[in-house]
Image: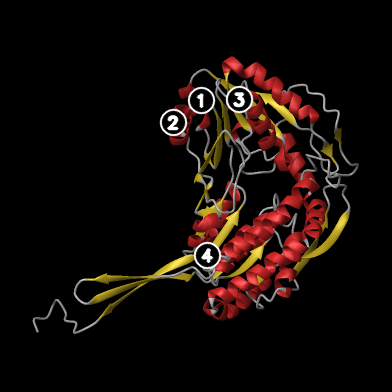
Amino acid sequence: MAADRAGFTSVSPRDGAHLFDLGLAGAQDVDRAVAAARKAFPAWRDMDGAARAAILRRVAEAVAERADDFAVLETLDAGRAGRDTQHSAVRAAAMFQFFAGMADKIRGKTVPVAGGRTTLVEYEPCGVIAAVTPWNYPLGNAVTKLAPILACGNCVVLKPAELTPLTTLLLADLMAQAGLPAGVVNILTGDGATGAALAAHPGIDKVSFTGSTATGRRIAQAAAANLKGCVLELGGKSPLIVFEDADLDRAADAAVFTTFMNEGQTCTSCNRVLVAASVRDRFTRLCEERLAALRIGDPMDLDTQIGAIVSPGQVARITRLTETATPRQIELPNFRPVEGGCYFRPMIIDITDSNAPFLRDEVFGPVMTIQDFGSDAEAYVLANQTEYGLAASVWTGSIARAETARRVIEAGVVWINCVNTLSYGTPVSGHKTSGMGSEYGLEAIDQYMRIKTTVQMYGAWSSPFCSN
């Protein structure tokens, strides 16, 4: 779709190379996309669920066949390590398969009521969904929205992040080739103004957004003007708690993985490490050893474990948030950034000031903080001492301790002796300012359906106001 605003350029964070020139969608583009979705909605809604499922399975097969192309494109566009983007492409295909399996299983129910009445409770698609996705997992974020939205009969207008739109555009092309009817999925490339116009559009029935809490608030405000519902998966500042009875080697593996995976650009990263004072020194040394062994640099090298940061602006933000920190001096022999690219030297920071910005704010970069605690109660206080409530990881050899932590920690996901083990079949919900609604699992379907109740009377009905 041609844009009615000046375009923008996609630049690779790997080495600064020019990738593509893209259109910057404006208000007229939003109008056209929403109109196309509204036109397509009745037929897509009324299509038999098995027929919708067949189309989604063809999409899954197409994504699987082009997995290598998706991986290369996302590595170039987002700077993500190639070993990670390969996994993302495979997961995207599996997610389409999972939700295709739900498309023909959405049923209402009939509830008999005394007095000759029957109540029919039905689940209907909401209509046209506005989806806005971030740049950290471009393909995965797009599929997380599209698969459940389409499975239950909605149409969608999706705006990918302006920094990383390329895999979403390839996906849209494959969906059309797989037989998805015109207008069911519409992609708008653009910036924040595009997303705001889409969220506020009167032709949109619901908004689904993943991104920062600050932007989520603006999206919700724009949607509120027309009383639209929202699904918001927002920021996190998640704790990883290591008790003295934990397997410290495995806990250190987990802390390094969750902090530095995807270059630290993961909302569920448990990079705020809280460790029992009695084992802090040993645990910190284990983390340092593991970080020193990581390969950091060219994301196109499949041996690389930490690639490029998404943009110069994000590198500047991480630098600003950590400029007052004194990171531990760790030699990184395998830190080999590509000239012209966007890279940030990973760091581990000992916490001495609980008000430091890198401890309070979501850094969204390869930065681990380590803070000790003296008692279980203090650990839980520190864990909950944040406006966010997305995830947490707890490491302990005690079942009782694990059960207490699960109940006390204010987060939508709590991992016990593991971390970042998310399945597309398991719901994820943010607490506090980490969002509202759920993604993944059968619960994702619920976000994009609405309930209609029909009460039928068999026999004569009489008004309570009348005696005859």
Circle 2 crowding by C-alpha within 10 Å: few under 14, some 14–19, many from 20: few
**Mark closer to the chain start, 3 or 4:** 4
The residue located at (62%, 18%) in the rendering is: 280
The disc placed on residue 206 is: 4
Which residue is tagged 2?
404
| Residue 287 placement, left or right of 300 | left
Q: Residue 170 at x, y = what percent?
A: 76, 65
- Answer above or below: position of 167 versus 214: below
**Mark closer to the chain start, 1 or 2:** 1
Of the two numbered discs 3 and 1 in the rendering, the one whose residue sits closer to the viewer:
3
Pick whichever, 260 or 104, lies toward us. Answer: 104
Which residue is tagged 3?
247
- Answer above or below: position of 18 versus 180: above
- Answer above or below: position of 354 versus 76: above
Measure how far apart labels 2 and 3 are at the Cα level.
18 Å
Callout 2: helix, strand or loop?
A: helix
Measure how far apart labels 1 and 2 are at the Cα level.
12 Å
